[in-house]
Image (cartoon, rainbow, N blue to C red):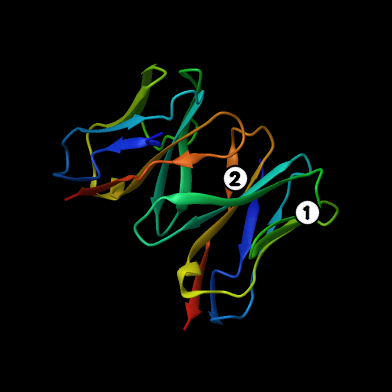
Amino acid sequence: DAGVIQSPRHEVTEMGQEVTLRCKPISGHNSLFWYRQTMMRGLELLIYFNNNVPIDDSGMPEDRFSAKMPNASFSTLKIQPSEPRDSAVYFCASSRGGSRTFGSGTRLTVV
Amino acid sequence: GENVEQHPSTLSVQEGDSAVIKCTYSDSASNYFPWYKQELGKRPQLIIDIRSNVGEKKDQRIAVTLNKTAKHFSLHITETQPEDSAVYFCAASITGNQFYFGTGTSLTVIP
């Protein structure tokens, strides 16, 4: 099992640009989570899906953020337009009940 | 919602000594308590977890204790080694979907 796969590992973009982060969960896991990690705020849950359906998006900071899960093996987190304060490490995680398995994260820098 | 507090925020111990990290939670309905270890620049990884029907769980040098009455749980690492240096996060969960993470403890093991 390759684990949770995220891409890209690093992303540097200019303010105002659209950013798309990608995630492939572990096969058989029916829940997928997007987290943001910063020094100031720690690990924040942005949104999670059960069986491809968004269940709780209350952690999504603004309308600039959107997430989709078109099928059980793929999810995207999009930021449009990006701002410098969006700079963080974004983790995707999946589970089949219980504990999460995290991906390696995408380090986003918005300049 | 659930509120998880974690202490201390930083911890330094001599190699071979024990380290203890404590978390408290607010919602008595929480029934699942995982601990994650995050090395610098890497993903959080589950190291041990405990459910509310158990008071203690051990895995080699790592143990977790749970006091449901007092609503706190602790991570114990014995015979610490330099490779134990990392940030440790506790979490509490009611449904298994929504995890409430603590703010993390940065552990440094001094050789």
The dot on residue B71 is 1
Horizontal and vertical percent position of residue B49: 65, 48
Q: Do badges 1 and 2 share one subunit?
A: yes
Most foreground residue, B49 or A22: B49
Q: Nearer the viewer, residue B2 or A51?
A: A51
Identify whether A49 is placed above or below B84.
Answer: above
Q: Is residue A19 left or right of residue A89?
A: left
Using the rendered view, name the quadrant where residue B2 is placed: top right
Give the residue at x 37% y 54%.
Answer: B42
Tell me: A109 left or right of A30: left
Sequence-wise, the earlier of marks 1 and 2 is 1
**Quarter of the image with the N terminus of chain A in it:** top left
Q: Horizontal placement of B45 versus B56: left or right?
A: left
**Residue B17 drawn at (x, y percent):** 61, 80
Q: CA distance from mark 1 to mark 2?
A: 14 Å
**Tag 2: Cα neighbours inside 10 Å, few (<14), some, or many (≥20)?**
many
Mark 1: amino acid: Lys
The residue lying toward the viewer, choosing from B82 and B74, is B82
Q: Residue at horizontal 42%, vertical 34%?
A: A60
Mark 1 neighbour class, 10 Å CA radius: few under 14, some 14 to 19, many 20 or more: some
Residue B24: give its label.
Answer: none
Q: Chain of mark 1?
A: B
Residue A13 vs B83, above or below: the answer is above
Whether residue A84 is visible here, answered yes or no, is yes
**Quick check: B83 left or right of B78?**
left
Q: Secondary structure at mark 2?
A: strand
Q: Which residue position holds label 2?
A: B100
The percent position of residue B108, horizontal first and vertical second, equals: 48, 75
Q: Element type at marker 1?
A: loop
Q: Residue at image x 38%, y 20%?
A: A69
Q: Residue furthest left?
A: A14
